[in-house]
Amino acid sequence: MTEQTDAADTATPAVLDTFAEHLRTLELPLPLEGTEQARDEARAAQAQLADHVIPRLESLDAPLLVVIGGSTGAGKSTLVNALVGRSVSRSGAIRPTTRRPVLLHHSADEPWFTGTRILPGLARVHAGAAGDAEAPRPGDTTGDHDPATSLELHAEDAIPQGLALLDAPDIDSVATGNRELARQLLRAADLWLFVTTANRYADAVPWEVLRSAAATDVTVDVVMNRIPDRPGVADELAADLRGMLEKQGIDVEHLFLVPETELEADGMLPARFVTELKDHFAHLAADSGARGRIARRTLAGAVDSLAASAGEIAAHAAAQDQERTQLKEQAIAAFSGARERIDDALGDGSLLRGEVLARWQDVVGTGEFIRGLEGLVGRVRDRLTQALGGKPAPAVAAEQALGTGLVHVVIDESARGAERAEAAWRSTPAGRFLAEGQDLGRIPDGYAEQVAASIRAWQGDVLELVRAEGSDRRTKARLMSLGVNAVGVALMVVVFTSTAFIPTGLEVGAGAATAVVGQKLLETIFGDDAVRKMARIARERLTARLDALVAERSGPFLDRLEELGEPGAGDALAEDAAALASLAARIREDA
């Protein structure tokens, strides 16, 4: 191996390492339109980085890799054998013929290819002794339709030093794996040698590959094989092919014409028919400047192609992030609606009817407020002392009824929020993918107990507020005469009917009367300012607990989104695209 002379070429530019890392960690989990294409694009970009771009940029003086590709039966292997002077690549009528790619190099260039500098995904298999090409190859256990997993190396001094030939599978092989491998090998080429025939040069598949070569500025040579040996036919076909190439905007460096002829007894194409091609390779191998220009031109085109791929993948990654944002907003909106409906239920007086109202009236009486509120504390105290033996104190029963009602509201509205979130998700393919098999709308085991415990904890907070505010001598006597629970229930009633929970006002009906009695009772004991402060603190604590309970139900939805990984890959890949385009321009300037 020769020493590197250009310090700039001894290390991979950071943009390539960064792009490779971004591709390696890229996740496109949502089944959006174009997802499979984006994944394929990412895999192809990773392969091109590893197979060609990074190794070539790190070793600009490495032998030029000429990949020989073409359609089934075009005669690639026969041509390769003729260039070497012996049978080294399988040819025949059974398709696919080239099951494992064959790389031929000068023996002095062997260190460039025995490692994983290029095509690291293919294991290296060294060819046996001369003449063994037709024998079963070591490790060749692939079936006709299985893609090859190894690269067969031949050290052949008939190949000029500084250049290597790679006989690739057919680009239109009946085996899908071979077609994919053929395109992978073509992406690893410094120079593409396309082999076609006089009767198949207009086929669609070769032109598709040639157009992709033109799009990436790859240097291309073409061999037209099996031209009928009649006067003027070769010139006519060559002119037609050149016209087609020009019309498609495909710049071919050299066009070689090989006439149709009988093979020799050993199945070899007579050497005289490949003299022009062999001389071309010899001159190219001897001209380091020409090899360097070809390598840089193809490399710049490959990096430009990666820049385009990065942009396309970035756009799809951004679409994935946008879909994730929409799904998150749908889940948040569903539970935000549930949270608002809980507030509505607290503020519209519905919670203070039925069982809660009956238990509250056990505490304060049923009609005293009509006759005026004077003496309210005394009357409430009198009613509390009239509780029947064996039954919970009226204040405790009211507290329990109020807590039970609030628990039911929270569970019901949280369940409705989950149902709405799941329905919204199931309306799109991405949402269905996330919800599939999850049963996100189901109330989880233990949630009801969790809600009940949280409400009880809040009620405990309220009782502590009452105790703390009634600790001074002036209010302590009244508080103790009524009981902390009764005063605490009054504060809970006030919290439920405070303006923070009343979107439309609460002016009439039993709920209004209940609120008025509770407010008056508290003001009589603590005073206006103290009641406002206690109600504010209690309301804030209730809000925090309700927020936490509803957020707990939204957790499974948001957790599914978190499992998708970190967003933002689109922005990073867009930056990669710009950096790759800049790198391609610098390489092209060097060329």
Image: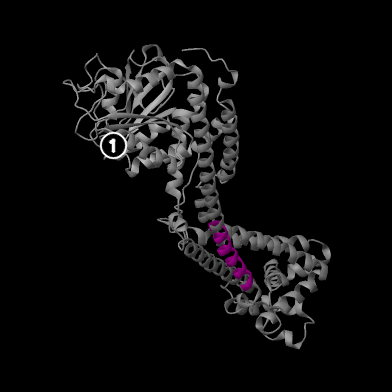
Kindly identify the amino acid type of the residue bearing the numbered disc 1: Ala
In the rendered view, tell whether residue 302 sits above or below residue 508: above
* Residue 463 visible, this orientation: no
In the rendered view, tell whether residue 321 sits above or below residue 274: below
Give coordinates of residue 380: x percent, y percent: 71, 77
Q: Residue furthest bottom?
A: 371
Question: Residue 368 is drawn in which quadrant?
Answer: bottom right
In the rendered view, tell whether residue 541 sits above or below residue 506: above
Q: Secondary structure at mark 1?
A: loop
* Residue that numbered label 1 is attached to: 198
Q: Nearer the viewer, residue 349 or 369?
A: 349
Q: Residue furthest left?
A: 265
User: Which residue is painted at 59% across and 18% down in the image?
Assistant: 7
Give coordinates of residue 23: x percent, y percent: 50, 38
Magenta residues (range) = 327-344
Magenta segment: does it hold 379? Answer: no
In the rendered view, tell whether residue 589 sits above or below residue 388: above
Judged by its main secondary structure, the magenta piece is: helix
Question: Residue 396 is drawn in which quadrant?
Answer: bottom right
Q: Nearer the viewer, residue 338 or 513?
A: 338
Give coordinates of residue 270: x percent, y percent: 24, 21
